[in-house]
Every structure is written in structure tokens, then in C-alpha cells.
């Protein structure tokens, strides 16, 4: 690793490589590269299943100053462009993740609200087949499992 480069847990890339990839992804999706967009992408990648408050704190730590509205606007744009995925567990704030391109599900802790990924056992999207599509062309099945995480179960 180059001197001065840091690796963020869970990303598998040093900060410079991750930033270059994020810049490329933004351009590939027709978006201008801005400090706010880079900070939000980085926050969501580093902290999977982050809510908007988590993203705001991380963006402010990276940039010094960014408005709540700017973070929400960036999250909306990145979701629309398919660069982040928004999940909405019932009764909990929306969460954002960078795990894209597969059809995984989630498990949510009823105690603390922790969210974790659950892989489909079938392996393709959608991994569930409805008894009737009502004329819809189904491309994704979303399942949320609920329970207690190991910490809350003790």
C-alpha cells in the first residue's frame, strides 16, 4: 500500500482506489463528481445499512460541513441512478447500502434495529416465485426477516 493510504474496514480498497472508483461510477451514470456525492457514496459503502443520520455524520466528518438537505438530495439521486439501494424495514428509518446487482434480503433485530444481509438460497433474481404476477414482470423479491440479534438475544 502506498505511504499515506488508508484502508477502511469492509471496503477492501484503500481510500484513493475507492475514491477513483466512486468518481468513475458517478461519471458513468451521468453525474457530476462533487464532494458531497463522494462523501455520501463512501459513507454508505463503509457503513452498510446506514440510515440518513449515519450518512450525515460521516459526510460531515469527511467534509466539515454539509446540510441535511444536501445529504437527502444526494441519497435520492444515488438511489435513482442505481448507485445505492434503499431498504425500508417497517417501523424503522430507511437504510442505504452499496450491495447491488444481486437479490439478497435482510434480517432486522427487533431489539436494537441492527440490519444484516441474508443471501437468497436459489441465487438468482427473483429468488421467490409468486403464485400470480397479476400481469407484472417481476424482477425483484424483497423479504425482511425479523428477530433478535445475538447481542439482544442474550
Image: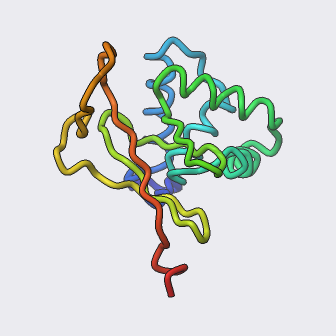
- Side of 30 relative to 58 (left or right): left
Q: Residue 99's x, y, as percent? A: 40, 42
Query: Residue 73: x and y, percent?
Result: 71, 26
* Residue 143, position as x, y percentages in the image: 39, 46
Q: Position of residue 23 (x, y in %)?
A: 50, 27
Horizontal side of residue 79 vs 134, given as left or right: right
Picture mark count: 0
Whether residue 22 sits left or right of residue 91 in the image: it is left
Residue drawn 42% across the image and 57% down it: 145
- Relative vertical location of residue 23 with respect to residue 66 in this rendering, above or below: above
| Residue at (63% x, 32% y) in the render | 75
Residue beneath the point at 68% across and 52% down:
54
Q: Residue at x 50, y 20 (%)?
A: 81
Pick the quarter of the image with the N terminus.
bottom left
Q: Nearer the viewer, residue 109 or 28?
A: 109
Against 106, residue 100 (above or below) is above
In the displayed structure, 50 sits above or below 79; it is below
Indicate the colouring scheme. Answer: rainbow
* In the image, farthest residue toward the bottom: 154
Which residue reaches farthest left?
122
For this rendering, which residue is in front, 82 or 37? 82
Amino acid at each position: 500500500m502506498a505511504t499515506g493510504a488508508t484502508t477502511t474496514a469492509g471496503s477492501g480498497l484503500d481510500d484513493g482506489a475507492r475514491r477513483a472508483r466512486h468518481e468513475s461510477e458517478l461519471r458513468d451514470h451521468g453525474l457530476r463528481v462533487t464532494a458531497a456525492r463522494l462523501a455520501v457514496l463512501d459513507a454508505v459503502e463503509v457503513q452498510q445499512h446506514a440510515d440518513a443520520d449515519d450518512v450525515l455524520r460521516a459526510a460531515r466528518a469527511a467534509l466539515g460541513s454539509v446540510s441535511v438537505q444536501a445529504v437527502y438530495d444526494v441519497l435520492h439521486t444515488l438511489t435513482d441512478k442505481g448507485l445505492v439501494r434503499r431498504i425500508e424495514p417497517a417501523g424503522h428509518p430507511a437504510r442505504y447500502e452499496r450491495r447491488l446487482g444481486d437479490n439478497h434480503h435482510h434480517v432486522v433485530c427487533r431489539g436494537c434495529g441492527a440490519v444484516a444481509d441474508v443471501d437468497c438460497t436459489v441465487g438468482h433474481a427473483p429468488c421467490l416465485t409468486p403464485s400470480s404476477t397479476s400481469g407484472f414482470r417481476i424482477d425483484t423479491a424483497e423479504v425482511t426477516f425479523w428477530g433478535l440479534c445475538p447481542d439482544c438475544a442474550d
